[in-house]
Amino acid sequence: MTAFFCDVVGSTSLAEQLDPEVLAAVMGRYTRRAREAIERNGGTVASFHGDGAVGLFGLSAAHEDDTARAARAGLELLGALSGLMESASDAFTLEARVGIEAGEVLGDVAMAASGALAGDVMNTAARLQAEAAPGTVVVGPEAIRLLRDRAELRPLTPLMLKGKSEPVEAAVVVSVGTGPRRSSTTPFVGRERHLSTLRRTLDDTVADQAPMLVTVLGDPGIGKSRLLDAFVADLPGVTVLRASVPAAGEGTSLAPVVELVSQAIGGATSALAAERLTALVEGRPDAVALESALRSLLGLGGQAATEHTWAFRRLVETLVARQPVVVVIDDLHWASLALFELVEDAVRWTRGPVLLLCGARLDLLDARRAWGGGMQRALSMTVGPLRPEESAAIADELLGPGAALRDRVVETAEGNPLFLEQLAAEARELGDTWDPTAAPTTIRALLEARLDRCLPDVVRVLGLASVQGSRFRLGVVRALAQDATDVDAAVHEAERARLAIKVEPDVGAFAHALVRETAYRRLPKATRAELHAAIADLLADDGDELRGVHLERAAALRAELGRPDPDLERRAGEHLARAGTAAYARMDLVTSSDMLERAARLLPLDSPARLEILPDLAVALMENGRADDAVALLAGGVDEAERAGSRRDAMRIRVQQLALDVYTDVSVADIRRDIAEGHTILEELSGLGDDVGLAQGWVVLDYLHWLIGDMASVEEAAGYSVAHAERAGRLREQVQAGGDQSTALFLGPLPLARVRRWSEERRGSPNPVVAAGGEAGIAAASLLMGDREAFEAAEARWRRMVEVGGLEWPGADVAMAALAPALLEAGDPERAEALLREGLDTMERLGDVWILNGLSFYMVISLARQGRTDEAAVLANVLDERYVWMGAPDEVVRSVALSVAQSARGRREGALALATEAVEHVRATDSTLLLVLALEHLAGLLCETDPPRAVATMEEVAQIDAAWGNVVGAERVARTLEAWRTTAAP
Ligand SMILES: Nc1ncnc2c1ncn2[C@@H]1O[C@H](COP(=O)(O)OP(=O)(O)O)[C@@H](O)[C@H]1O
Ligand SMILES: [Mg+2]
């Protein structure tokens, strides 16, 4: 346990100087800060007395993490108080001092907490506090020992404390790192150049107020992690978050993100996590969405309509608002696709000074060839061998200065400090019998040899532990051992041999990933398979992904041995399927496609679990740009489902095939046929009451109708999908179809008054996507109906809902597909451009090529209408080069945009041909807005070459506008017609 005592210095004289009321207020604030500092760092407030407070960290045994958190609480309290003072008058000063000591408490912690147990720890902490200089945190001997690797301490001359005969060792805490306890206590040497580059990069980040990515690359054991630790150990005024990626088969794919988030809120396991989370995001406009996204990420329950990449980025922005942030992600070579994307997203898009610092083996470049490339704000540095004199300094430290074998050790290690440490350990263990000339010449071989020589129990325990990963739970090792092996004793022994270390009372860690790899590889494959399978059962509470990962390993090993185990494969597949489905539900389609794909490979072809995940997996693959894989996946799926007797799955799979058809055939007749088939299938699913299938299926129909420009049917299909998705608790369709619904309503054939009425009904929906779509609908309709005030109000409400709800994709979608064209129609190209720019940024960030493909063409029109014709023409070329057919509406906008660009360059004929094409396309759709857009543009081009046809066309526009209720457009058209008639008049 660690005891924490604090009080306010000079409070008596303070009481004399101050108005009692002011004093009470100041003391109240101080008390609150003290409580906050203690609790935020995971401690409990044991008591308040006068102007002091006592906090307790951890349970009875002394544990370094508790001490580190107590020390951090002390520094935070001092920081908070200086903040308080700055905001108060200069008439007085108020300073706190803190005393901290760690130690074992015999008996009940509750008793200690109540103050009844005046143990030695409590006494020492109280005395240290009394001796501490104002504005400092002073720690005692046991705390010093525990903090040594984690904090920067400034030693004090030993203190004579009341009740102690000997002077007591004490030190002032200067800073506390967030790094883990490490096995190495050798002093840090060298790396000056690396450190100065890192510092400079951090300075740049702060100066530019923009993110930077630094990747530190090097061989295992060369000192990457230590370099990162050394860098972050001393960064006053910077928030540091640090996590490592577990090796494949050792942990869940987003475990590092969970770790970073929980550090940001000061510990996620405690019951306070939820409360702290709320406090952290408080006051942000997107607090609600952010909190629920982070809750779902931490497994605290809750459903989020936003992606974790968004949530992580916003969380970092929250922290950055206070002070610069350094995010360390070590061992990035083991990252999942989802994690890579999260880091890239953060580097590209976070606003504010954040340094993302990654450590990785060179294999990273195999997994992500282009890592860091193509990113503007990224740099890599390689960590090479230490210089001989640096190695010698470490060797002196480890072997004692001037040891006879020193030069030999230094030479063999070739500048790899891990190698050096292990050789030194070997030398110490073997003493005079050690023959350095016979020592293994690689670090891997050396570790092999050292494990060979360990006591059987130690080797066995390390082997059992290695199956869990770099960190391992002793309880799990005990359960795997299935006998009376003294696990604690073995770990203790391994600690002496510098192979592993206990980092928490029930948690151990290998001294280095290479030690784990060596211990793991020594196990026969059959044993590994058994252990992975056994662990999956022991981790029953740890969620599907981790269990699935272990079972998957077990199954793979069995297959390698030529003894595949179908039951293991099935169980692995079922867990991964559940985990992948959960990821799908939180809209993490990257993780989802990864896990569902693995599940689909493991599960028997006709198993219910496999058939059930195929449609979602197909969607996830498609969304990740892998349409061909999706097609291959579903091929044969319908027959498999029919054979398995599941008509429901057969139909769900068939519907997704209809969506995928579009990638191979794009004729309108084919799409119409697919639509007809889709309707038949959905009728049957409806007979089965299958909400999931109906949510999936209606979104497909929404999309197919969109392709042929049948907005009324899009609107209807999207509405059904949302309703079924709500019943089935499926978020993806709610977001996708919820957005389409309002866009299609506005673009479709209904009169604007009706659009506005329907939208008004929707704005009260409990579904945030539907409600925001409702506001957008009101805004767009009001604008054209000539009610600018209603437009402004609804647009502001829409904007707020998008921000509050974190509705990035649906917000950008509706902005580009409905609000921007409405503004163009209303004659406000500047504002249309601004909305389009925002939307394009978001869509580019989210990688939505779909939207970029078609809707970007509105940008051409809005530039041309502002007279920026060169820009418009250049953009039109760029966009058209990468354009692919994605339906009739896109085609209309594109043709108009290209025509506008041509006419801007004086190419009359080309412009006219394209405008005519646009009108042909638009006549096949039921979109009023697109129709008036295309016709009015055509009329404008015709007015010089064919005035009668121009007038006739414009008159048609006038009629449409009148029926539609487009007051703004109608006025403009009337003015144009009027002008044409007067000039044409003889
Ligand atoms: N510059 C250094 N000075 C002292 N010890 C170091 C240094 N670099 C690494 N070490 C030690 O060498 C061992 C391996 O370093 P580590 O950072 O874990 O390697 P990597 O992350 O590159 O695999 C650790 O025990 C570490 O403390
Ligand atoms: Mg490392």
Image (cartoon, grey):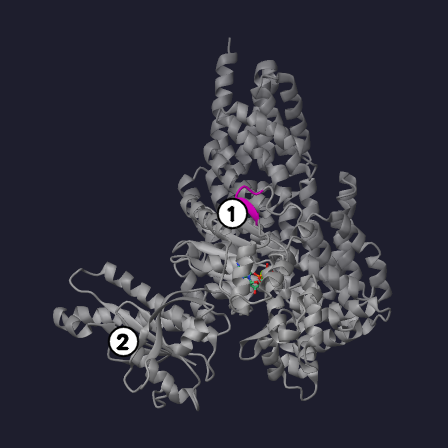
Q: Please give the name of the residue rendered at 57% of the width and 29% of the height, measured from the top-left corner.
A: 957
Residue 27, image quadrant: bottom left
Residue labelled with disc 1: 349
Which quadrant is home to the N terminus? bottom left
Q: Would residue 376 be counted in the magenta stretch?
A: yes
Q: Please give the name of the residue rendered at 37% of the width and 86% of the height, measured from the top-left corner.
A: 120
Could you tell me the amino acid type at mark 2? Glu
Q: Is residue 381 left or right of residue 584?
A: left
Residue labelled with disc 2: 131
- How many residues crowd mark 1 within 10 Å: few (<14), some (14–19), many (20+)? some
Q: Nearer the viewer, residue 789 or 274?
A: 274
- Magenta segment, which residues? 375-381
SS assignment at label 1: helix
Residue 758 visible in the displayed image:
no
Residue 80, image quadrant: bottom left
Q: Residue furthest top?
A: 986
- Image coordinates for residue 37, horizontal then vertical, percent: 36, 70
Q: Is residue 761 left or right of residue 628?
A: left
- Image coordinates for residue 264, horizontal then vertical, percent: 46, 63
Q: Would residue 213 be counted in the magenta stretch?
A: no
- Image coordinates for residue 383, horizontal then vertical, percent: 58, 52
